[in-house]
Image: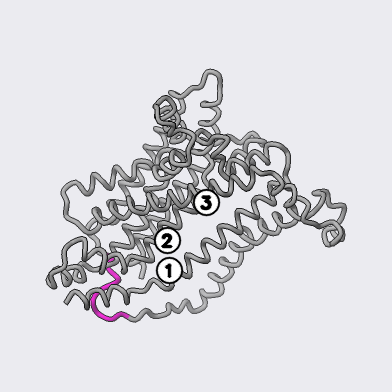
Amino acid sequence: TFPLILPAIVSGMLLSFIVMLGIYGVPATLGAPANIPVLTTYIFQLTSWSPPRYGTAASVAMILMLVTGALVVAQQKVLSGRSYVTVAGKAFRPRTLRLGPWRWFTLALAVIYLLVVVVLPTVALLIAAFRKFLYIRNFEALFDAKQYSWLHFDRLFSNPATVDSIINTMQVGVATALIGGVLAFAVGYTVARTQAPWRRAIDVIATVPVAIPGLVIGVAYLWAWIGLPGGFYGTIWILALAFVARFLPDTVKVLTSSLMQIHRELEEAAWLCGRGTLSTIATITLPLARPGVIAAMTLLFVLSIRELGSSLFLYSSQTMVMAVHLLSYYEGGNFSVTAAFSLVQMVLLAVLIGLTSLATRRATPTDAASGLGRAG
């Protein structure tokens, strides 16, 4: 089992490391007040000084690139010369892995994780969002129903900028998912399914942005487009392109792992039946990889909704997104409104993930099997 899931484990470890390095919101809200600097907040400070120290910020980004580059090299060495095919032409029936006495230990870890990461923060947000005043006199006052109302949500949606930020975020998310999904599938297919001599170079080039924090990408796009004619800067498209550049490596890893699990014999059978490359991709490869494609596009959408670092330098008054608007509420001292807006964002993401999960369950390999039958 472990060798089969090794690509997903390595990609997940790399993704977790990248996300940790690129996060700005959490260190800015929790670390900065306690004088705990991290690289992302330090880079933002360098770019916000007068005059801005873009050279020093680039030097700090180079350190991240060296560390992440070492991880990429290690990943290539782990995966080189191995096969991870799990979807083949023969029938396969998955079986349940019995953990024995270890099942209670793993269950306890899962429960603790859910409590610390999901339940407790959500309860805290609910209390802060619905309670009229954050001050709680005693434990009994916590359960006083008279102290809870929709006051902060009324304040939130009475601001037209809130609705505008939600609409802008949805537009940017859809654009990022569509553009990034197509590019990621093209790169992933080239790397995992072809023998092109330059496929490794493409893989490396697509992975390079993982070492660049969102703040640095935002600054780069700012100076690349602000002086050019055409009015591209200040639109949702520059945000979408910046998000694609920011998160394309993560999506490529997801799709590459998904494509590596599909045996080439299925494509070869379609070729023998007279199908061309594009037709084979449309009727065989894409249906089999559909769950991975949906997951990758959903990942792009979710990450773009949450992205703050790149947005700080690229939004305008007409294209403010939810992450920036949420930070503005926090910096303005509106903590209860911030909690209410955070709940709205969580609900939107939960609905999106639920719909994606439903679509993924319906995306079965039977479509590919029928496509192969039609090829004959």
Q: CA distance from mark 1 to mark 2?
A: 8 Å
Q: Is residue 85 magenta?
A: yes
Residue under pointer 2 = 295
The amino acid pointed to by label 3 is Met
Closer to the chain start, of discs 1 and 2, is 2
Residue 360: mark in rendering: 1
Please give the label number shown on residue 170.
Answer: 3
The reply to whether the magenta stretch includes residue 199 is: no
Residue 267 visible in the displayed image:
yes
| 70 and 143: which is toward the camera | 143
Report the quarter where the C terminus lies.
Answer: bottom left
Q: Where residue 35 sits: x, y (%)?
A: 64, 33
- Seen at 42% across and 33% down, the residue is 221
* N-terminal label among 1 and 3: 3
* Residue type marked 2: Ala
Which of the image's four quarters has the N terminus? bottom left
- 17 versus 39 height, above or below: below
Indicate the amino acid at tag 1.
Thr
Q: Residue furthest top?
A: 51
